[in-house]
Amino acid sequence: KAGVTQTPRYLIKTRGQQVTLSCSPISGHRSVSWYQQTPGQGLQFLFEYFSETQRNKGNFPGRFSGRQFSNSRSEMNVSTLELGDSALYLCASRSSTSSTSDTQYFGPGTRLTVL
Amino acid sequence: GQNIDQPTEMTATEGAIVQINCTYQTSGFNGLFWYQQHAGEAPTFLSYNVLDGLEEKGRFSSFLSRSKGYSYLLLKELQMKDSASYLCAAVSYNTDKLIFGTGTRLQVFP
């Protein structure tokens, strides 16, 4: 079974631009979560989607948004990029929405650099 | 509130034993995860504890004390490939979100 895939793997943008990242979950997994990882803050939860609906949201500004398609693939969008948005963006999938019974499987991440 | 603390860096020698500690303050605590992340790679699941006690999986064991808000990951017979970051994450039944610590970077030397 193929793992979680993310595209692109690396991205360089300039301040003020917008970016869209893509995540394809493991086949059969309907929940997709997004995280931002930086050296100082560690992994921080952005949001979770299940069956095309946002189920949970972290404490990020409205510039960060996402969506999920009927095939469970998810996209994350960041508008008006800031230097502080430079980070590794990780996507994780699981079969249901229960953290306590389903393990999250992470993708390799998209490394975003904002210049 | 939610808070997870773990040491930033640790070093150990090949063949030795190392214990990585994690303390947490999570309202509605409902379990603790450990993940391993090699540089440039995705985090991979190591263990999940919800009840007090020690869970052993080969060379890796994880311990939880709910009353103390404390967990540790024990790595035995260290190998060079164990050099990685180890992430501790608590889950709350209030939010069902994983709250991660900043990770402990372990370096294993020959």
Image (cartoon, coloured by chain):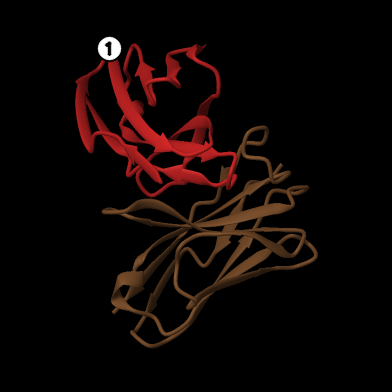
Chain colours: A brown, B red
Mark 1 highlights which residue?
Answer: B15
Give the vertical position of A80 relative to B87 (above or below): below
Q: Is residue B89 visible?
A: yes
Which of A13/B61 is in front? B61
Q: Is residue B110 visible?
A: no
Residue in the picture at 36% in, 42% down: B3
- Residue A31 position, x and y percent, is 69, 52
Which quadrant holds the C terminus of chain A?
Answer: bottom left
- Residue A98 position, x and y percent, is 68, 40
Residue in the picture at 43% in, 17% down: B63
Give the vertical position of A71 relative to B109 (above or below): below
Taking the image as shown, residue B64 lies to the left or right of residue A27, namely: left
Residue in the picture at 80% in, 65% down: A70
**Callout 1 secondary element:** loop
- Residue B106 position, x and y percent, is 27, 31
Residue in the picture at 31% in, 25% down: B21
- Residue A69 position, x and y percent, is 74, 68
Give the vertical position of B13 relative to A60 (above or below): above
User: Which picture quadrant has residue B83?
Assistant: top left
Q: Amino acid at mark 1?
A: Gly
Chain containing mark 1: B
Give the vertical position of B61 relative to B100 (above or below): above
